Amino acid sequence: MACKLVAPLFITNETTFIVHSIFIGLFAIGAVKLGRGALTAFMAVCWVLGNLFVITQANLFGLNVVTSDGFAIGASLSLTLLQEYYGKQAAKNGILIGFYMAFFFVIMSQVHLAYIPMLSDTTHQHFIPLLERMVRIVGTSFLVAFISMNLNLFLFGFFNKLFGKAYFSLNALLSISLSQLVDTVLFAVLALSGNVDSLLHIILFSCIVKVISASISIPVVSLARTYIKAHRTL
């Protein structure tokens, strides 16, 4: 059955990307408003969605990129906010919860494929090429995320001491950008080899896109966090 192409919701991929990044920043702030549990859940959902959508490629600013980079920034941004609002231990607990949710997702994806569909079913055939890759992708994501997220925590703490907590946007941008550089290279080599057209393009351009996405999301968060206080009891 031929693939039906749907016109971009926001006319161009570039506009969609900008709106995507802003939405992620706004939802991250909304999670802060709801409390620590919501922020941790938001981070875990971003991680799962990033793994699910990572095999979709699109042309963005003339570059061949995967469309999940915004979710990687969302997860890192959530981790940064957990550390900023609730402390480093809360952020570390968030990483473990994210691991647990991603592990549950990959197990359930394989259980889903084990079902024998009815002859009239029209969806199972589309799940197979998507979900059968999840073991490799999520397995790699465990290793890479453990490295990059802990690096993000370390760098954010380092830049907080170096520049002071008043420079939240700068500290967050530097820590997220550097940790995502490591994340992108490791994940692309280990998980995407053989699944994308140009691995080098994905690495180089995803790094650029992630910095752009972070540059859009972080100012939104920085502006909103001025007016939002943490729920210490949630």
Image (cartoon, grey):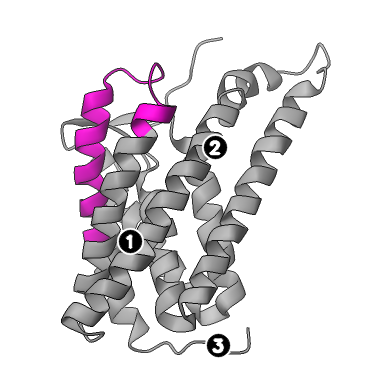
Q: Nearer the viewer, mark 3 or mark 1?
A: 3
Amino acid at dot 3: His
For the C terminus, give its image quadrant: bottom right
The residue that label 3 is drawn on is 231
The residue that label 1 is drawn on is 22
> What residue is at 57 percent from the left and 80 percent from the top?
35
Question: Quick one: label 2 or label 3, which is nearer the N terminus?
Answer: 2
Magenta region, main secondary structure: helix
Residue 55 forms part of the magenta stretch: no
Report the front residue among 37 and 158. 158
Q: Disc 3 and disc 1: Cα gap in Å?
A: 23 Å
Tags 2 and 3 touching, CB below 8 Å: no
Query: SS of the residue at dot 3?
Result: loop
Q: Nearer the viewer, mark 1 or mark 2?
A: 2
The residue that label 2 is drawn on is 138
Question: Is any atom of residue 60 visible in this view?
Answer: no
Write down the region rendered in magenta.
Answer: 188-215
> Measured along the vertical axis of the image, is residue 216 above or below residue 135?
below
Question: Quick one: label 3 or label 1, which is nearer the N terminus?
Answer: 1
> What residue is at 53 percent from the left and 60 percent from the top?
95
For the N terminus, give its image quadrant: top right
Report the front residue among 67 and 86. 86
> What residue is at 41 percent from the left and 29 percent from the top?
190
Q: Disc 2 and disc 3: Cα gap in Å?
A: 31 Å
Marks counted in the figure total 3
Question: Is any atom of residue 229 visible in this view?
Answer: yes
Q: Nearer the viewer, mark 2 or mark 3?
A: 2
Instruction: Classify residue 54 as left or right of residue 179.
Output: right
